[in-house]
Structure formats: structure tokens, C-alpha cells
């Protein structure tokens, strides 16, 4: 993926809901993405940041339009209340925005 991110997990919510509660929904994939360099920097600054990793991206079709959204690392850093994460989170946020824009283009 662009900007140094790679998909490391994929959750197929459609299949999970069908298998677990017999509910049919439209395709609803959630992808866990990680930039190893930025993740390692964040872990070095805030060891417990792992609870917020990886960043999730959501791809969803609704009304004939495809929507792609992702977690904002800046918000995740604010939750940690560790100011030392802010520059790493800003870098990750900018890279995610550029990666998403490249998918739309």
C-alpha cells in the first residue's frame, strides 16, 4: 500500500455476522493497516499504544458509492495523553490521508 502501510489483518464483518447471528448484511470489510516504521516509533514512545494498533480502514459500498475511511492516528494519540506521540501521529495521519487519496484518484 502507498505511504509505507500494509494490510496486516482483515475482518470480514459480513461473514462474521452471518455465521454468528445469522444476519445478512452487505459486504463490510475492515482492514488493519500498519506502517512498521511509524508503529515502532510509537511503541518506543508509548509502549501501551499497542492497544490502538493497527489502524483500521473501512471499505463500504452504500447507494452505489464506495466509501473508504480510516482511523485518525491524531485522535488515537490524544487518547493516550502522551504529547510525545503527537509528531508520529501527525506523520501517520498525513500518510493515511495521502494513501486514501491515491485510492480515490
Image: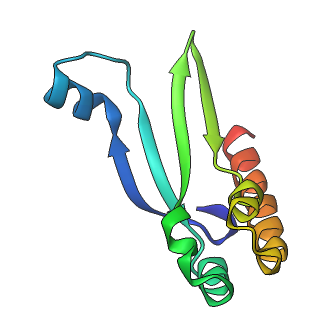
Q: Is residue 35 left or right of residue 93?
A: left
Image height check: is 85 above or below 2?
A: below
Question: In percent of the image, x 60 and y 78: which residue is there?
Answer: 39
**Residue 55 x, y percent position in the rendering:** 57, 58
Quarter of the image with the N terminus is: bottom right
Residue 73 visible from this viewpoint: yes
**Residue 81 x, y percent position in the rendering:** 75, 68
**Residue 45 x, y percent position in the rendering:** 69, 86
Q: Residue furthest front?
A: 81
Q: Is residue 104 left or right of residue 12?
A: right
Question: In percent of the image, x 60 and y 72: which residue is there?
Answer: 35
Quarter of the image with the C terminus is: top right
Image height check: is 96 above or below 65?
A: below
Q: Is residue 49 left or right of residue 41?
A: left
Residue 103 quadrant: top right
**Residue 6 x, y percent position in the rendering:** 52, 66
Name the foreground residue: 49 vs 31.
49
Residue 53 visible from this viewpoint: no
Amino acid at each position: 500500500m502507498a505511504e509505507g502501510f500494509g494490510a496486516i489483518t482483515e475482518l470480514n464483518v459480513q461473514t462474521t455476522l452471518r455465521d454468528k447471528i445469522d444476519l445478512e448484511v452487505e459486504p463490510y470489510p475492515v482492514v488493519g493497516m500498519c506502517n512498521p516504521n511509524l508503529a515502532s516509533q510509537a511503541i518506543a514512545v508509548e509502549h501501551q499504544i499497542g492497544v490502538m494498533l493497527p489502524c483500521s480502514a473501512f471499505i463500504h459500498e452504500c447507494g452505489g458509492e464506495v466509501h473508504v475511511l480510516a482511523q485518525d492516528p491524531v485522535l488515537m494519540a490524544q487518547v493516550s495523553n502522551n504529547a510525545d506521540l503527537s509528531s508520529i501521529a501527525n506523520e501517520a495521519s498525513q500518510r493515511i490521508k495521502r494513501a486514501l487519496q491515491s485510492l480515490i484518484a
